[in-house]
Amino acid sequence: MVHEAATAAPPQPIEPGPVARLFQSSLPGLALEIGQSPIDEVVTVRREDFARVMETAKNDEQLALDYLRCLSGVDWLTDLETVYHLHSFKHGHSIAIKVRCPVADAHVPSVSHLWETANWHERETQELFGIVFDGHPDPRPLLTEEGLGYYIMRKSHPLADIEEWQEDYLKTIEEAKSQMAVATGVAAPVDEKALKIQMAQQKAAVIKKARDEARAKGLSPEDEKAAVQDAIKKFEEEHAARQAAAPVTPAKPVDERAAKIQLAQQKAALITKTRNEARARGVSPEEERQIVAEALKKFSEEQEQSAAAPQAAPAQAPAAPSVPTAPMDRAAKIQLAQQKAALITKAREDARAKGLSPEAERQAVAEALKKFAEEQQAG
Amino acid sequence: MVIETRPPHESDLETIDINVNVGPQHPATHGVFRMVLTVDGELVVDLDPVIGYMHRGNEKLPENCDYRQVIGYHDRTDYLAQFNTEHCYVEAVEKLAGIKPPERAEYIRVILAEINRIASHLMFFGAFGTDIGLFGTSFMYAFRDRETIQDLFEEVTGERMMYNYFRPGGVAWDLPDNFRQRCMQVLDSVERGVEQLDGLMMENEVVLARCRGLSPVTPEDAINWGLSGPMLRATGLAHDIRRAEPYSIYDRFQFDIPTGKRGDVYDKLVVRLEEMHQSARIVRQALETMPEGPIMAEGLKRVLRVPAGEVYMRVESPRGEYGVYLVSQGSDKPWRHKVRGASFSNLSALRAMAVGNFVSDVIIILGSIDIVLCEVDR
Amino acid sequence: MSLVLISHNPWLESLARLAIIALLVPVTVIILTWVERKVIGRLQMRLGPMRVGPYGTLQGVADTIKLLTKEDVRPQTADRWVFELAPFVIVVPVFMAVVAIPFTADLFIKNLTLGLFYFVAVSGLSIVGFVMAGWGSDNKYALLGGVRAAAQLISYEIPLVMAILAVAMLSQSLNLAVIVGAQEDTPNIAYQSLAFIIFAIAGLAELYRQPFDIPVAESEVVGGPFVEYSGIRWSMFQLGEFVNLVLISILGSLIFLGGWQWPWSVFDASVPVAAQVAMMAVKTGTFIFFFMWMRASLPRLRIDQMMSFCWQLLLPFAFLQIIINGLVLVYDWPNEILIPLSGAAAAGAVYLTYRAARATGVRYQPGYQTVGSVL
């Protein structure tokens, strides 16, 4: 038989069941709200009485609720509720005890000293709902990662549209951080990535200017290269001077993991830099490896020194690279290759238009390339 | 509660304890589970379990699902005992909504759930043999029988694993016509297979030497740690939810509750082995008395609206007490759907049970808990 | 060497025999991998390899090709030379031991007067390789496995050597051909049943197979000292393991089961080489099958159980066997008296082991709470 969905019947006072009556007799004057469920009795206690009620539940002879079956959190939008389902092996009765707390003040005393199994249940409820269990010996998150920052099981955490929500969430975090920085007067944590992008853009502008100047002056490709490199060196020296004058501290890493990541990034940057330098100089692979290893050793020594002598601010200005050769070479190489490719296509088309045989076509292309190389050499 | 560890040996050698990471990928962790062991030689001094690799939001997602759509989530929570988990959820909804399923549906549910219990315990023996070093022999023996059971389930539901067969109010469709013969066939061959498995493992001298007396658990500790199922019964406490808080039609069948004495690993093996025999007994009784008739309650609407209320429904799954705490606000979607996985509570006791043993034994203790990580992490 | 294979020049002859052995041994190993998978498969109610070649006979070849073409990965933080030399240290002594083994009366590389001693000494060298592999891999699992391997192999070396020593005492020689020759009428197993049992068990432990495979426990240390190896180096370990298997089996057949001579020698005929080879193959095959059967049936022992079994059970019984032998030799009793003495000691050992393993008796009965139905 199916009951129709119950229309809101006038709430009749529900009689407390046997277990609830035992509670009332053990703790006289206890304010209990009796609820209803098809299988168990349900009582809601106030948060102030909660610790007392739980101790009585475990230790009282007649209650002897020694088995905690289930610990759930429920989000009622304005309140957070924790539900404890208890069972007694001695007497065979069960009961569900609920306690509510407002969302703004979500604290509930922990019961893991009474029932060992509550340990993991409380950890899970804590990380999923945000209810803090006071007195829990090990409140690490259990199922989700550390530092998640939001509570998954709350109704305020959406089920759909999760990606847009996450972007908004991260943006609010950033704003909150900068606001807090402004409010407390500390220099806002610098966005490393934005800084780097800015510097790269400036450098590109400098390179372009120097190249245009050199072309305007009609220099040979080598002179042009040399002029551009001079310009870059000057730019970087200026930049270093500016950094030294007003040291922009890189964002202090918040925790160990971020610090490690930063260190690894620095190391990686150092490795690429030394490797490019070595390659530009044209050393053999073994020497290159040696050079990189030496650079790494020096870096770790520096790190140790700076860690041994703690400074107020980690004054690690972005190190000015000494001989920037790679990017310039690569761009020039690409340009050269493009020129060659254009030349080859032109020569091939010419030969085909003239109707030469494949052999003759190949020869013509080779001659054109040779001429181009000679021009490059000479001009 | 104090965890007894052996004191470090006094000697002139300066030793350190190393951290061995029995990592998420390991042949013995029964899924994606990580233990960080602190090991003094071969002795495990501390153990830190790390879970959450399989957390998929099985409690959050049903808040957006129709009551019938949630059944699939329970299939995937404990994927070795799906009929038991579906049974739990479906009973919870029925209790809240006041639906009474017809007789035939109840019989079908009990039969399938009990055969699923046999299949789950077979899987346990297979995996446990591999943990203890049998080079796959127990695995092959167990899976020969489990395959016959899965073939039977495929005939009934069309699926080998994620059955999605129970519905609030009954079952999805009726059993095939030859189900009774097929079921008796399967039971006979499975019981023969269980006898063989019994002979291979339970009187095996090495199994006895490894498992006897390993990590004994007292009933008080078991209750405190929240253990349930065969873990609890191995300590000597004859608590079975099918008997203590009967649900469905379990109070019509005669079966025994096997218990152990010391709660060590060997007792757990014995309890699970005997439970397989008892499950077969229940199924035979049910097959004899199963009536014909409808398999779905009358008058259920297409979209099920459950009146406001709450219920904590629990069943005896092969791993222990599997519970569903369902809170409804009167709509067609649950307001709160909490799954109490048996393996979650059982696994939380691992540290207390395993510290102070050798590394090899910790693997065996973990295997004897018979965890399913999807139930732990949901 | 009475049988001349290539030439009368002893050097050329030896080189030729070495080359033949060096070719035959890997082939044997390839065949053995197929045999093992088939045997274990049948014991597990399944077929084993069936697809690669007729009845899967080419499976060994396929596995070898796969292993040889795999990338040789070396962890960056591994101790380089220790890591890379470990497979050699395990495999080379095993091949060195093959040199001293006579396969039949005439088929051998060199019949050493101290053949038995040489065999024992050389096969003990492999143990260093395990420790090298365990340490050099820079992996905690490898370290655990390497330490376990060292403990196990060193411990079980002693009962093994004692059992072999007992046979040597009886045959008054360390020359393997002479030992086989001394078994014309009865194989040594009749006289030295206890030593045979100890040899079989200690040999199983030396091969780190179930139930003694704690160093390479699959479900705990996932390969033990070999966990970081791949490709050719891994295949060298497998090669070493299987050649060791063959060696222990051949040794057992030679010194306990009568080698190529018994029971042909009972009929007092001069047997052709083929018959000798066949008899050796049958006896070696029995040993190999026994080892594979144990692998499929028994779980592994824990390390402390294994060590206590070796030092508290096997070793005293090995000493017992030697004492019995010594008494017989000193007082010049006829060898036949060894049959009941040794047999009694063997029966005692088996009984004590059985009792120790059974712990508290027969199959444990669970408690039952029979609750009737409500109907």
Image (spheres, coloured by chain):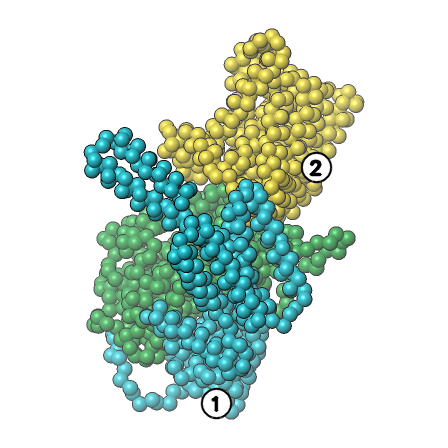
For the question of whether residue B237 can be seen, the reply is: no
Please give left or right for residue C142 compared with residue A173 in the image.
right
Give amino acid for label 2.
Leu
In the displayed structure, A56 sits above or below B291; it is below
Give amino acid for label 1.
Ala
The letter of the yellow chain is: C
In the displayed structure, A107 sits above or below C177; it is below
Q: Quadrant of residue A137?
A: bottom right
- Mark number displayed over residue B269: none
Classify 10 Å Cα crowding around label 1: few (below 14), some (14-19), many (20 and above). few
Please give left or right for residue A352 compared with residue B266 in the image.
left
Foreground of the two, A323 or A123 = A323
Q: Residue at x 60, y 8 (%)?
A: C8
Foreground of the two, C61 or A85 = C61
Q: Which residue is mark 2?
A: C315
The letter of the green chain is: B
**Residues at marks 1 and 2 touching, judged by CB atoms closer than 8 Å:** no
In the displayed structure, C71 sits above or below B9; it is above
Q: Residue at x 51, y 59 (%)?
A: A233
- Mark number displayed over residue A31: 1
